[in-house]
Image: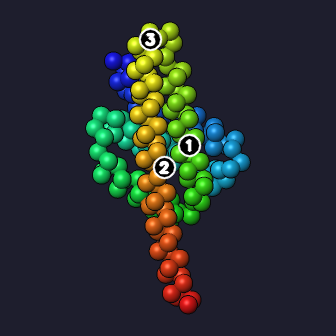
Amino acid sequence: MIAARLLQRIETNWEQIALAVMIARNQDPELPHYKHLSDDEIRYRVRDLTANLARWMASPDEARSIEHFEQLGRRRYLEGMPLHEVLLKLTVLKRAIHTYASDQNYSLTPMEIYDELELLRAMATYFDLVIFRVAKGYDEVARQDREYSYRRTG
């Protein structure tokens, strides 16, 4: 099945995807905070998301994903990353994976094209979950922080 092979190539070749994310980070004026992250940190983050994509596709354990990505959102808030940059970076990663997946499939049969479309649809669902849960975790900590600040100054 082409979708399984393609997913395996995405997970195996995550460094190529990370390189595309680093290039986009360096060129995008909307990602100023991410420009300060080392290439190693970007690689680590891309590796984490691609590995979780492969696990989620193999067995969509939403409860595990919910906690993982809400925790990721909480960490990004505590690191001082603006939410719009966090979400844009996730979108950049999603595009990089999509581009990589599309570039890997030349001269496909109609059935293989259907498999690829199904994989891309599942990836879109995964990233919808990631973006929502990261934003939710981020917002949860930001709200607690505001409430704490209000109580201290109120």
Of the residues under marks 1 and 3, which one precedes in the sequence?
Answer: 1
Of the residues under marks 2 and 3, which one precedes in the sequence?
Answer: 3
Pointer 2 local density, CA inside 10 Å: few below 14, some 14–19, many at least 20: some
Identify the residue at horizontal 52%, vertical 30% (top origin): 98
Q: Is residue 73 above or below residue 127?
A: below
Tag 3: residue type?
Pro
In-image side of 71 versus 36 (left or right): left
Which one is in front, 108 or 51? 108
Tag 2: residue type?
Ile
Residue denoted by label 3:
110
Residue denoted by label 1:
91
User: Which-is-in-front pick, marks 2 and 3?
Assistant: 3
Mark 2 near mark 3, Cβ–Cβ under 8 Å? Answer: no
Q: In this view, does 8 lie above or below 44?
A: above
Tag 1: residue type?
Thr
Residue denoted by label 2:
131
Q: How far apart are marks 1 and 3 (CA)?
A: 28 Å
Where in the figure is residue 127, as x and y percent of width and height?
Answer: 46, 42
Identify the residue at horizontal 37%, vertical 27% (top origin): 8
User: Which-is-in-front pick, marks 1 and 3?
Assistant: 3
- Tell me which colouring the rendered structure shows: rainbow
